[in-house]
Image (cartoon, rainbow, N blue to C red):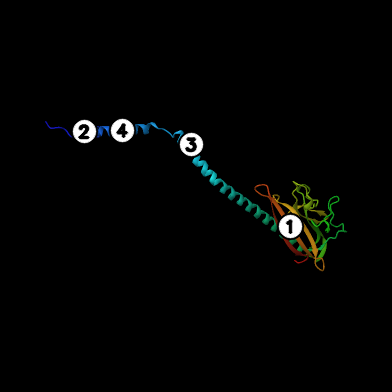
Amino acid sequence: MKKDHSITLNNPGRGLPKHMSNHFDRYRTNDLGFLSTRRGRTGFTLLELVIATSILSIIALLIYPAYRASSRSYQLSVVQSNLQQNARIGMKKMVKELEAGMVVIPEESNDAKGEGSINYVYEKEKPFKMAFYAWNSTSGLLDNDIIALYAALPTLNTEPVGPAFSSEGQEPLLYIRKYSSSEWSDPEPLVLSDVKVIQLNFIMGGDNQDQILITLELAQAGPLKEWRTFKLVSAARLGAR
């Protein structure tokens, strides 16, 4: 009788000689046990989770200082750019107004008096304010229009205050105010409220005292609450326009 030596997938040892059949059965049992063990595991072991967490923590510790330094550098550049932009805009407007003016109102005059005891006239001891007559280009004559440039606190924006004498927490701004038709206009800030004026000086010079040297210094809090500053100096000539 002829023996059946065919091999099946369910029993690869069937039909083989005994010693070969035992060999196949042993490996088949091991393979099934391995597959059964793999199917029984549904997640990570505690040791694997601890190792993975440790590796991620080390990576985060290595990356965070570089990220923080980059973020702080970016914030500082934003603050510095904002200071420069505000200083240039404020200085440009002051120079434009001064060059369109004609005569600085002297200290002994009362022509630049505001509400109450406020007086915007130029004083050497108080160089943070200046008032001057505007030129009437239509008639070619001086009129009663007056322009005042000064530093003041936002809460008291009509009264000039020396930035160097402001208390901690006070943030003076740069203002312009115009007098026309027998009344003063509302103060107009020349810089944004997120900066503060820490220096504003008007110094008169020239043979006819018609040259004005302007010093404007602004400050703004940085990302770590430290103050960053920017100073700009320019000159203007009265009646240059």
Q: CA distance from mark 3 to mark 4?
A: 31 Å
The amino acid pointed to by label 4 is: Asn
Count of labels in the image: 4
Residue 17 placement: quadrant:
top left
Give neighbour class at mark 1: few <14, some 14-19, many 20+ (Cα, 10 Å): many
Instruction: Identify the mark nearer the N-term, 4 or 2.
Output: 2
Is any part of residue 62 visible from this angle?
yes
The amino acid pointed to by label 3 is: Val
Q: CA distance from mark 4 to mark 1?
A: 86 Å
- Dots 3, 2 in contact, CB < 8 A: no
Q: CA distance from mark 1 to mark 2?
A: 101 Å
Instruction: Identify the mark nearer the N-term, 3 or 4.
Output: 4
Give neighbour class at mark 4: few <14, some 14-19, many 20+ (Cα, 10 Å): few
* Residue 141 at x, y percent in the picture: 82, 65
Tell me the mark number nearer the camera, choosing from 4 and 2.
Answer: 2
Tell me the mark number nearer the camera, choosing from 3 and 2.
Answer: 2
The amino acid pointed to by label 2 is: His
Give neighbour class at mark 3: few <14, some 14-19, many 20+ (Cα, 10 Å): few
Instruction: Identify the mark nearer the N-term, 3 or 1.
Output: 3
The residue depicted at 78 percent of the width and 60 percent of the height is 202
SS assignment at label 3: helix
Q: Which residue is mark 1?
A: 216
The amino acid pointed to by label 1 is: Leu
What mark, if any, has residue 19 been given in the picture?
A: 2
- Dots 4, 1 in contact, CB < 8 A: no
The residue depicted at 50 percent of the width and 41 percent of the height is 56
SS assignment at label 2: helix
Q: CA distance from mark 3 to mark 1?
A: 59 Å
Quadrant showing the N terminus: top left
